Structures are given as C-alpha cells and as structure tokens.
Image: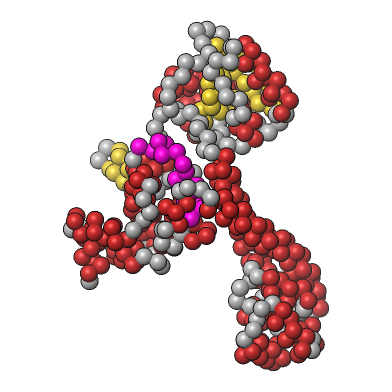
C-alpha cells in the first residue's frame, strides 16, 4: 500500500496486547531510555494512560505499534487524534524475534520492546492506520457479521438434516429449502411423520396457504406424499431424542434467519446511500449480497492503492513466486485478509453465471489444466484489474467497453468468444 505522510514523532510506543492487560514499552524521541509498564484493559485505565501521554508530550504525535488493525484496543485508541497507529502483522514480529532469539524464548514485555525497535528502524516499511469513514467502517462490520451468521445458518441446517435422516427423512424431500420459515414452522407443529399423518387435510391445507403456497397442485402433491409416506422407524428410543434435538435446533435457526434479514436491511440502507454504490451495483452477479461486500473491499480511499497490482496482492488473489537455486514454483498467497479474498473469489464465481465472456474465460482456464478454485482465482485476478480502473475513474462497468478493449488488443479471449 502507499505510505502515509511522514510525521515527526515525540515518542514511540510498542504494545503487546492481551485480553485482560497490555504490556507497554515507550521510548521518547532523542532518548535511548525505554520505559515499560502494564496497562489494564479497561476504558478508564486506557484513557488515563493516554491523557498522561498527551500531557507529557504536549499533544505532539506519538507512534504506536501493535499487532492489530481492529479490535477493542484499536477502537479505544483511534479516538485520540495525536496517536498514530502502525498495525503490525504478528508473523513479522515473530520472525523478527526468532532472528535474534534462536532459542525461541518469548515474553510479552520483550515483544513490546521489539515493536519499538521495528518502529525506530523499519518505520518506512510500515503503514499508518488510516480509518475509513464511519459509514464504511459500519458497513464493513455489517457484511462480516452477516457472513458469519450465514455460516451459523449452514451449520444449523446441516445438523437438522443429519438428525431428520435418522427418523423423518421424508420431510427433507417435501421442503428443498431448509433455511425457510415454512420448514421451521412445519417441524415445530408436526415433528414426526406420525404427527403429520394424524393432522386433518384442511389443517395442512390451511398451513401451506398461510405460508404463501398458492399452487393447488403443489399442495395436493405434498398432502399425497404425507398420506402415503412410510415411517423409517417406529423405535421410540430413536425418535424421542431426535425430536428433542430437532426442536432445540429450530429455535436458534429461527433467530439466525431473522438476524440475517435484519442485517440485510441495515446493509442495504447504508450501501445504497454511498456515492460509490452504483459502481458495484452495475457489476454482473453482484446482487444484494456481493455488491456491499465489494464496496467495502475497495473502500472510499482511492489513494490506498497506487495500482491494480497492489490491490491484487493485498486481497490475496495475486500468486507468489518462490525461487531457490535452480528451482522455481508458484503458490497462492498465504498471508492476506481472508474475508477480502473470499469476497473477490465468491463474486468472481457468481459472475460466470451472468457475464458471457466470464464463462468463456473460466472454461479457458480449465482447459489449461487448472483446478476449479485455481481457475476462479485467476478470473478474480482479471476482475480486480477491471474494477480498479472503474473505481479510479468512477465509471460503472460496461461489458461492451471491455469487449472493445479486447478487440483492440486482439486478445485470445476474443477469439474464444467468437468460437
């Protein structure tokens, strides 16, 4: 990433963070003396320590190095304008420590001192934290939390499916989508095949109509399936515990589905009000889910990346080449923001269903012998280069413009499109 403007710092601070306390090392500018202390992780203790720094150095900038770019400690320190935070990759500190401590001895106060050393000797390699706008930061948290909720939903539906296969497999055929209110309500009311078969036909018809199933043929098919179904087992030793498990899983599934809907509303409200939203909304396959995630991936600070290559590397899409002697090999990037990489890869895979040239490009990669995931990452690599230009120029994506660019370059992809 591009480096921030240089500052003249009055002091340099290294913080080795923890859950309950933080080890702090401070060295004032122009002094070789280092002061170490412990700081409790409470708002009052952090505020008192920062006020002491402000008073001691007359509000001049103080450089703070820590192994975080977000989290409670970062959120607490960001509100003080004279503190300039330098996030450090934990692996960088670990390798630096091992370089001078082959025994691999480790201590929290020592790590705080090593962070001060890195600030003093390699500050040109570090990038100061430059927070996005409050709206963008809120949107970033919302899309990440939503993705975790989707993961929770998948885990719950998988456990429900596993439990139902043991005594009531027919319901999995009657309802193809397990993450729906009708599926939860049906199992809450009729948790076993016997209970469903004892229900009146009018009751079942009223249930389906209340859940917006209007097609008479669909209702008749389900009612006939319920009537003619044969129980997998009648063993009460199997049915009773699994019924209790299913009821226990349905309750959190309902809460999770409602939470996802609430997050969708909050995300849509903030994303659509952002001036850059039309840039991502015009992308093929972005939709209501990927468009806000792509908006967060690029952000509003266009000076963060000087080129598309920097963004590809930061997102973990650009591969890494290693050379040792006469050997050389390429592998995917191990250290990167995983959620950012997931966003790019998931959207690239989805876009193949909406852009014709994307389907051809993906197949072209597969024809060279690449596995599916490698082909998708190669496609995401190309998409980032395209989106970077749209993002910098503030111009929505236009497929016809891109195809004309391919024609001017006589790209091989254009020949495959013609075929």
> What secondary structure is the stretch in magenta mostly built from?
helix
- Based on the displayed image, in which of its 4 quarters is residue 240 positioned? bottom right
Residue 338 place in picture, x, y as percent: 50, 47
Q: How far from the left and from the top, in percent, is residue 87?
A: 52, 31
Q: 67 left or right of 231?
A: left
Foreground residue, 165 or 359?
Answer: 359
The residue shown at (65%, 81%) is 213
Above-or-below relation of 417 to 402: below
Please name the residue shown 53% across and 13% down the image: 10
Which quarter shows the C terminus?
A: bottom left
* Residue in view at x 58 percent, y 37 percent: 70
Q: Which residues are magenta?
A: 291-306
Q: Is residue 343 visible?
A: no
Q: Position of residue 409 (x, y in %)?
A: 19, 55
Q: Residue at x 73, y 67 (%)?
A: 250
Task: Decide which of 291, 75 is in the foreground and name it.
Answer: 291
Residue 341 on the magenta span: no
Q: Is residue 400 left or right of residue 235?
A: left
Judge whether residue 329 can be spotted in this image. yes
Q: Is residue 299 magenta?
A: yes
């Amino acid at each position: 990433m591009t480096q921030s403007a240089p500052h003249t710092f009055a002091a340099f601070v290294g913080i080795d963070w923890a859950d309950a306390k933080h080890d702090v090392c401070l060295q004032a500018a122009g002094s070789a003396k280092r002061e170490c202390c412990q700081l409790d992780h409470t708002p009052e203790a952090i505020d008192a320590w920062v006020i002491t720094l402000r008073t001691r150095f007359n509000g001049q900038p103080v450089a703070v190095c820590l192994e975080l770019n977000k989290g409670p400690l970062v959120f607490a320190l960001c509100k003080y304008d004279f503190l300039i935070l330098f996030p450090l990759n934990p692996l960088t500190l670990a390798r630096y420590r091992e370089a001078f401590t082959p025994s691999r001895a480790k201590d929290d106060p020592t790590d705080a001192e090593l962070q001060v050393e890195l600030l003093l000797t390699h500050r040109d390699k570090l990038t100061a934290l430059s927070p996005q706008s409050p709206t963008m930061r809120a949107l970033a948290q919302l899309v990440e939390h939503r993705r975790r909720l989707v993961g929770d939903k998948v885990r719950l539906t998988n456990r429900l499916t596993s439990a139902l296969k043991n005594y009531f497999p027919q319901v999995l055929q009657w309802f193809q989508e397990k993450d729906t209110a009708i599926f939860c309500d049906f199992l809450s009311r009729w948790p076993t095949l016997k209970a469903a078969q004892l229900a009146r036909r009018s009751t079942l018809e009223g249930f389906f109509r209340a859940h917006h199933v209007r097609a008479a043929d669909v209702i008749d098919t389900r009612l006939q399936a319920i009537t003619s179904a044969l129980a997998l087992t009648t063993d009460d030793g199997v049915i009773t515990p699994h019924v209790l498990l299913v009821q226990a899983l349905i309750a959190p599934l309902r809460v999770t589905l409602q939470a996802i809907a609430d997050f969708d509303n909050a995300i849509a409200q903030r994303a659509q009000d952002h001036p850059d939203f039309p840039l991502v909304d015009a992308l093929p396959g972005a939709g209501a889910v990927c468009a806000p995630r792509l908006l967060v991936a690029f952000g509003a600070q266009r000076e963060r990346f000087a080129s598309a290559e920097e963004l590809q590397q930061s997102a973990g899409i650009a591969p890494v080449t290693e050379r040792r002697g006469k050997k050389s090999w390429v592998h995917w990037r191990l250290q990167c923001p995983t959620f950012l990489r997931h966003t790019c890869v998931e959207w690239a895979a989805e876009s193949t269903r909406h852009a014709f040239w994307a389907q051809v490009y993906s197949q072209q990669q597969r024809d060279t012998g690449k596995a599916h995931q490698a082909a998708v990452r190669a496609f995401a690599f190309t998409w980032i280069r395209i989106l970077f230009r749209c993002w910098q120029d503030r111009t929505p994506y236009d497929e016809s413009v891109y195809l004309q660019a391919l024609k001017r370059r006589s790209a091989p992809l254009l020949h495959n499109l013609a075929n």
